[in-house]
Image (cartoon, grey):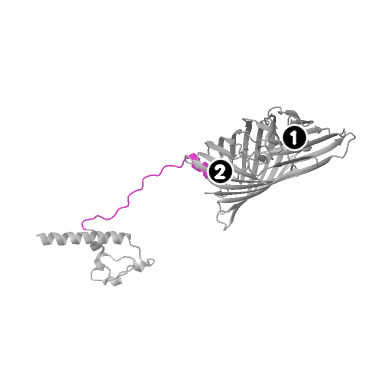
Amino acid sequence: MTVVLAVSSAAAQESLVGAVMRSQARPAAAQHPMDLPMSEDSQEGADPQRQPGWTWDSHIESAAWLQPPGAPPAISTPRPPTAAPRATQFGAIRLASVPNMFGDLGLASVMMTATDRPSGGQDLNVGAGLPLAGASRIGKIAENDSPIPRDRFFFNYNHFHNVFQVFEQVNPPIGPLLIRQQPIDRYTIGVEKTFFDGMTSVELRMPIIGNFDTQLQNVGVAGGNAGNLTVVLKGLLYMDEALAVGAGMSIETPTGSDTQTRIGTTRLQFNNEATHLLPYIGFVWSPGDPRWGWGSGWFATGFAQIDVVASSNTVGVLGPGGMTSQTLGKLTEQNLGFLDVGVGYWLFRDPDAPRMTGLAAIAEIHYTSTLQDADQVLGFVDGSRIAIGNPANRFDVVNGTVGVQMLLFDASSLRVGGVFPIGNEDRRLFDSEIQVQFNRRF
């Protein structure tokens, strides 16, 4: 009885598996009316090798022997439903390719003037622009940055043409006005790291200034190479599929070099001691991304920011040994307001290209204005009357920036731009500027 049941069970299992295999098997060739399966009666006694649409191999064992004992045929189990993407994920995809803003800010400076009356009886009027704040003042968020937190390394090169000048003139009679203008090169290295699922980031910027030492016969100005280390704290406030809004603050610390000036034989030193706090709010807008095949290639970026000077810089007179022998006073730089708007368009976008995966053209307008009257330091040193401050008291500056961005391997960007002041001489902080920027995301 046991043998009969075992044989019956095996036969039933083989019949079941065979039926399953026959129901899922595909014919070896397209069926022809002559190849239709034969009826059950006509299959009796037929050669298995002659069955139409089937291939017979005597070396293949029955699938029943390959099944685990008593195991039912495998049935696919449905996968659990995945969570729907968040709106921020859609927004991150769409806004990820929007380039950073180029920026425009020159080296903010104050003017020093002096009147010296030597024994000859003629007045000697001299003056010099003083690039303070470690000759940098790079806390402006619009300088190669975006409101969206990102993981990246970056490098910026800025060449400012005729960013400050020195002059001298004898009076009376009025002699020739001697002027010498000075360009400055600035190199900035930085890193930005995101936290809390990309909602915030911390960014570090360290500028290095090229040598500047501008001298005339009776006046001169010089400074060191170190700039002010700046920390930028960024946060994402809102994001949807086409718009992102962020806010944060830049903190510029007084790590830069001091500035020295010379008036005849008198030497002054402007100690870099001021801390700058620069809160901002900004947006990024892009209706589509040609990388993913939707919308257009237009995009826009904007920032509003203020520069609040939290402390002052001491102005001292240097003695023969280079030590401070006299303090003229403390000079507080003017608070500034910034408005920056930029638009751009992707001229080319192909993420599958071997090297350059995108090319964008960008145009920007930058407005800078003083928010308070200028501070002044007045004094007499060795018979010379010295005045330090902003002779125009306030200023409003508008600069235009144009540039292109090349996207490399969809992870790096190389950017080249130019900045051109808009307005007459008294509305310019420099004559022109060249920018080269590189970003590498990680």
Which residue, given by chain and number where applicable, does mark 1 sit on? 111
Determine the main secondary structure of the stretch shown in magenta: loop
Q: Nearer the viewer, residue 219 or 368?
A: 219
Q: Is residue 412 above or below residue 323?
A: below
User: Splitting the image into 4 quarters, where does residue 38 fall?
Assistant: bottom left
The spot of residue 415 in percent (x, y) is 64, 49
Q: Nearer the viewer, residue 143 or 299?
A: 143
Q: Which mark is residue 95?
A: 2
Residue drawn at 56 percent across, 35 percent down: 247
Q: Is residue 91 magenta?
A: yes
The local secondary structure at tag 2 comes to: helix
- Does the residue at mark 1 contact the one at mark 2 (Cβ under 8 Å)? no
User: Splitting the image into 4 quarters, where does residue 52 fall?
Assistant: bottom left
Instruction: Identify which amino acid the numbered label 2 is placed on.
Output: Leu
The spot of residue 127 in percent (x, y) is 78, 36
Q: From this viewpoint, which residue is outermost toward the right?
A: 173
Left or right: 430 as drawn, with respect to 151: right
Question: Which range is magenta?
Answer: 69-95
The spot of residue 254 in percent (x, y) is 61, 36
The local secondary structure at tag 1 comes to: strand
Please name which of the two marks, 1 or 2, marks the residue nearer to the observer.
Answer: 1
- Regarding residue 428, the answer to whether it shows in the image is no
Residue drawn at 52 percent across, 41 percent down: 91
Q: Is residue 424 above or below residue 48?
A: above
Q: Which mark is residue 412?
A: none
